[in-house]
Amino acid sequence: MLEIKDLHAGIEGKEILKGINLSVNAGEVHAIMGPNGSGKSTLSKVIAGHPQYEVIGGSIEYDVNFKKINLVGMEPDLRAREGVFLAFQYPVEIPGVPSSVFLRAAFNAICRHQGAEEMDPIDFDKYLRTKMKILEMDDKFIDRPVNVDFSGGEKKRNEILQMAVLNPRLAVLDETDSGLDIDSMKIVAEGVNKLRSKNNAIILITHYQRLLNYIQPDFVHILHNGKIVKSEGKELALEVESRGYDWLIK
Amino acid sequence: MTEEQMPLNIEGLEQYQSKLANNSGAWLKAFRQKSFDQWSQIDLPTVKDEEWKYSSLADVVNRRFQLASRHQLIETKQFENYRDKKDINIVLVNGVLWGELSDLKHLPQGLTVSSLNEKLAHHEADIQDTISKLTPNDTKSFLWMNQALFLDGANIQVAKNAIIEPLVHIIHVTSGIANDTLLFPRSFISVGEAAQVNILESHICFEPVSYLSNAVTDMRIGSNAIVGYCKAQAEAHQAIHIGTTRIWQEAGSTLDSFSFNHGGLITRNNLSILIKGEGTNTIMNGLYGLDGNQHVDNHTLLDIQHPNCTSYQLYKGLLNGKSRAIFNGKIYVHAIAQKTNAYQLNKHLLLGKEARVDTKPQLEIFADDVKCTHGATIGQLSQEEIFYLQSRCITQQMAIQLLSKGFIDDIINTIKNDSIRGKLSRLLLKKFPEVKL
């Protein structure tokens, strides 16, 4: 589904990703771990197409209708409509825009893109509420402006709700566990697990092993200094937990 | 009076004035003459005047203006689309009250509407008294010009204790004029003790003409009355609108006002509210949605002369293209006005790279036991916000729409009257398809 080849990217002329190679198939969950500043968040933003990040070399190939297309250079909204989703480490507040309006606009953009009929507000409201139940979110959330006055935990939960509503084929979860207490993390992890299927893939970017107790990855990759230095099964995360990163990067 | 001393170059002024004088009673004739004399003695403001620092009228001086002679509405279809049959519509065409288009019959009990010219021509002590008491402000040259040359106006009286349910919509429509015409819309509104009313005053034009509309509205709000008042400026693109709104608020009264600026090339609004009694509540909100080379200058003055009064002011501006906005919010708290609680905020969203804002709060406080706060912000859409929306399938263009709509929604929603809010939203939609969803 996703084939990242020798990806070099950076911000403001500074190279942060220095040759990433990563292959992700449908149905898989990949965890990307690494110390601070290793390039984890940069990787997630480059996949989603943040305009501030510049791809210097390499490609991000992504399957669309059984064909590989290169995401590099594609508008972020088009990537999203093709099923790429980024759960933000720091979700942005959108004052004045109610969550329901925002989510319906997003959802219907995908419908239009797929040539399907758009959903009217009443049907969408029902659909949204079924997804909110999964994440145990309060009804009043619907009318509140997106992320405004949300606690850190609510914002993260809202990211996963958006994922549930938009049903992406490739979801990149950037430090979704940070700022969550244990109960919220369980709810969020359960939500993510419910969204796992053989048709979609998830990349979990995380600093700690904690989240991986609840969302079991098929592969764990260690990112250091802009390169993947080790890839193994889920037991690698436990090893990192007990030994730290030093043994991997020295 | 010779031409050289005229502050403005106006064609056929003398004939116009003698015609006016023939149609006026003694009081009105003297009132016009006195105003004319005062006007003749002062020049038009220039950017050297502190109050006009950012708004140049240099272009006006070089033009030769005409006075409106016909008062016929041409664009009846567009007009019908603008007004709402559920409202009480009071229509003035080029400054003259137009009975056929107005709902002057079957008015709710307690509401009377008449021609201001007729009322002032005869002896109407109440109105004359109020108008004389209202002090001129810094658009005085325009105020006096209006008083010297206004043809007619809407005179609206709400009786003591009357509660007027439907919206009273005063529509000043400019129609069928030549370029460079001078117009003098005028209204006088008097709301009796403990009465309640919602008023919208629109300034509209459906033709691509240039003109200068010098509008004056005077309002007296009796004690314990509750008034909603909105001014909607939707003039033609090339128009200049200079508005003077003078409001007199008596004890215990509530004024919920809104200033909406939409059309026109150059707009100057002077809103002055005199607090003439204890325990009043004043809301002064406003919204300007500008594009192209539009220029809107809002000067507001709240003059608090009594204790225990509260005020809330929020003006928001959405600026596209090379448009420009000026805000000057003066709140004057007299020494006697203890326990005043005044809040002021002015926020802008700049969509155009060359848009510009000059904002100045001006609090002059002479009482020691008061609570006054103010603030101003000027911002652009952040890349993070746009990226966040884009990452949720929303195009960049639509992201800008959503964020702009988000910016103005809260101020539009402060308008409690549905009919007013609906009309303003429709106007905004036409101009900023960005805010459509």
Image (cartoon, rainbow, N blue to C red):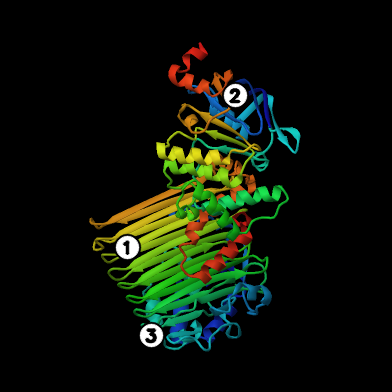
Judged from the image, the secondary structure of the residue bearing numbered disc 3 is helix
Please determine whether, in this image, residue B277 is positioned above or below residue B385.
below
The residue that disc 3 covers is B125
- Of the 4 image quadrants, the one containing the N terminus of chain A is top right
Question: Do the residues indicated by labels 1 and 3 lie within the same chain of the protein?
Answer: yes
Q: Secondary structure at mark 1?
A: strand
Q: Is residue A183 left or right of residue A158?
A: left
In the image, are marks 1 and 2 on the same chain?
no
Residue identifier under label 2: A13
Q: Disc 2: which chain?
A: A
Q: Nearer the viewer, mark 1 or mark 2?
A: 2
Alpha-carbon span between mark 3 and mark 2: 77 Å
Relative horizontal placement of residue A182, taking residue B179 as reference (left or right): left
Disc 1 or disc 3, which is closer to the eye? 1
- In this orientation, which residue lies closer to the viewer: B223 or B153? B223
Which residue is labeled 1 in the image?
A: B310
The amino acid beneath tag 3 is Ala
Q: Position of residue B203 (x, y in %)?
A: 56, 70
Q: Amino acid at mark 2?
A: Gly
Give A28 or B193, whichever is nearer the viewer: A28
* Chain identifier of the residue bearing label 1 in the image: B
The amino acid sitting under disc 1 is: Thr
What number is the disc on residue A39?
none
| Label 1 crowd (10 A; few <14 / some 14-19 / many >=20) | many
Q: Residues within 10 Å of mark 3 (few under 14, many from 20)?
A: few
